[in-house]
Amino acid sequence: MPWCPTCKNEYVEGVTVCADCGVKLVEALEERTGSPLIFGEQEQMERLKDFLVYSGVGSAKTDFDPKDGVYELFVNDEERTRAAAAVSVFLKQEKEPEEETKREVSRGVYQNSARLAEENRSSGYMLLVIGGFGLLAVILLFMDMISLPFLSANKYMVCGVMGGLFFLFTVMGILSMKSSKVLEKKAETENNLTSEMRKWCTANLTAEKIDEDLFQEEETGEEIRYFKRTDRMKQMIARQFMNLDEDFLDAFVDDYYPELFD
């Protein structure tokens, strides 16, 4: 008798497609092995299964639970510990875009102070030029040195509004220039700190030292290795250089990692 591999309903001979699920029927249901490790939506569970298989967990399989209406991921008991570690890495990767967005809203991700200083300086120049020429034009209009016939009836209102707008541009330009000078000093401090950190890493960090007693034999997935390596690098650097900004440290480790691990 044919069976539906999704909802597990049995059909009479001659039926080839499940009326409820729309999937092709099979002659016999595949026996489930192991115990459910995690459950969720079909798309996520299928991606997680592929990730586990890629990471060396060959027993990973998905199955639909019609009672709860969810898809479950199964693994053999022998591979359960390794699978749990890989699932943790997968879920962390899944959450990264959302967490990154939250960080940008709450405090902003790390950006190079030198680049920010240049952006503020460019914005400051542009605002000062626009504000300066605009104020000059407003003064000339007010003194009737520039004649615009369609403004004759509303000259004072137009000059007042436009003068206030261009004055605001000028003030914003001055503030941007001051901000760029502050950021330039911060960039100099960051560059010195980065140089000292790179010198220390060159003298004290090696791939062998970072990997020492870090992995279990079954942990062969590159994703697992990357997260564990970067975590250890951050811990080692943070012990040497106190009170580092978390985003600055993350950016430094991401930049230095390829120099140790291709």
Image (tube, grey):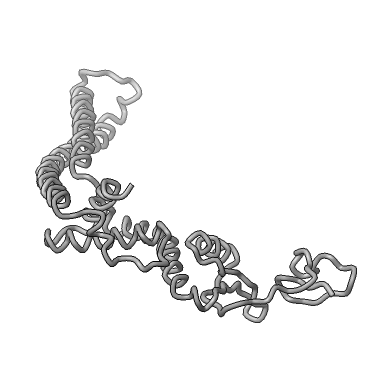
Q: Quadrant of residue 208?
A: bottom left
Please say whether residue 168 is visible from this viewpoint.
no
Labels in figure, total:
0
Pick out the residue farthest to the right. 14
Q: Quick check: 89 above or below 177?
A: below
> Residue 88: where, in percent of width, then height?
42, 68
Please say whether residue 216 is visible from this viewpoint.
yes
Q: Quadrant of residue 69?
A: bottom right
Q: Nearer the viewer, residue 216 or 9?
A: 216
Q: Quick check: 180 above or below 89?
A: above
Left/right placement of residue 43 relative to residue 207 reads right
> Residue 174: where, in percent of width, then height?
14, 38
Q: Quadrant of residue 34?
A: bottom right
Residue displayed at 55% across by 66% down: 58
Q: Nearer the viewer, residue 5 or 170?
A: 5
Q: Quick check: 14 above or below 222?
A: below
